[in-house]
Amino acid sequence: MEAGSVFMAHTLAVLVSGGVDSCVLLEQMTKKYPVVFPLFVRQGLFWEPTELNYLHRFLLKIKTAALRSLVILEEPISDIYGRHWATTGEQVPAADSQDNAVYLPGRNLLLIHKPALWCAMNQVNTLALATLKHNPFPDNSPLFFSSLEQAIGIALGKNISILRPFSNHSKTDVLLEGKHLPLEETFSCIRPVRELHCGSCNKCAERKRAFKDALLADPTIYATSISQL
């Protein structure tokens, strides 16, 4: 076995946002692997500046010897999405909207290919994602991930495993597993207001339900709650 292979077998990259799911996954992986690289893909979406601020604070609070510095990969998508609600923050799907209202075409396809290339060029052979079981979109199916894994191997001449430990989890399950973590430093909103969760978008509603279903106190400060005081 080559020296590089030994290194690869003990390292992992985790695709992170500032959300509950990927933050909990990242912390769990630091307990299982001696070297863990958090990767963030910046696409120019409306909520990303606020999301990154939360993520940096979360990383500081869970810092361990295994956790490496955040790697930010640039992948602007405004040329494809145009004036989409995800890039403008306008007409964002509201709390009562259906899941398909927040569908971003090719989201996982766009998010995975560049981190996979980063892994291949940095001797990391496993990329972990925090996709959940209830995600109804076509780029969350087992067939998609197995096919993409195969295509990446062919394209790069290296096998990059795509690990999905939460594929049978709901967001409530994830909250219960991560209830000991600083969840107030996670971010789920798609229309942030003054660095706060708006409290009225589809993703804020999902977050509120998950905390309620988990019977956990929600530490989130919502802008709507402040405005009603």
Image (cartoon, rainbow, N blue to C red):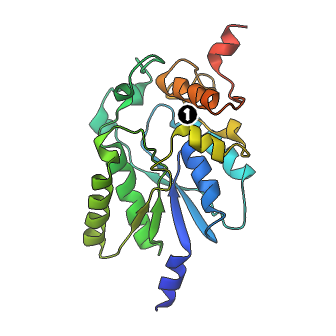
One can see residue 19 in this view: no
Tell which residue pokes out farthest to the top in this image: 228
Whole-percent x and y of residue 115?
Answer: 42, 59
* Horizontal relation, residue 186 to residue 44: left or right: right
Whole-percent x and y of residue 57?
Answer: 69, 44
Tell me the residue at 61%/69% (across/down). 33
Q: How crowded is mark 1: few (under 14 residues within 10 Å), some or many (20 or more)?
A: many
Nearest to the observer: residue 80 or residue 139: 139
Tell which residue pokes out farthest to the bottom in this image: 1
Tell me the residue at 53%/67% (across/down). 12
Q: Label 1: which residue?
A: 188
Q: Is residue 156 above or below residue 17?
A: below
Nearest to the observer: residue 45 or residue 8: 8
* Horizontal relation, residue 104 to residue 122: left or right: left
Give the residue type that dot 1 points to.
Ser
| Quadrant of the frame with the C terminus | top right
Q: Is residue 11 above or below residue 62?
A: below
Q: Is residue 142 above or below residue 193?
A: below
**Which image quadrant for residue 107?**
top left
Tell me the residue at 38%/65% (across/down). 117
Please tell me whether mark 1 sits on a helix, a strand or a loop: loop
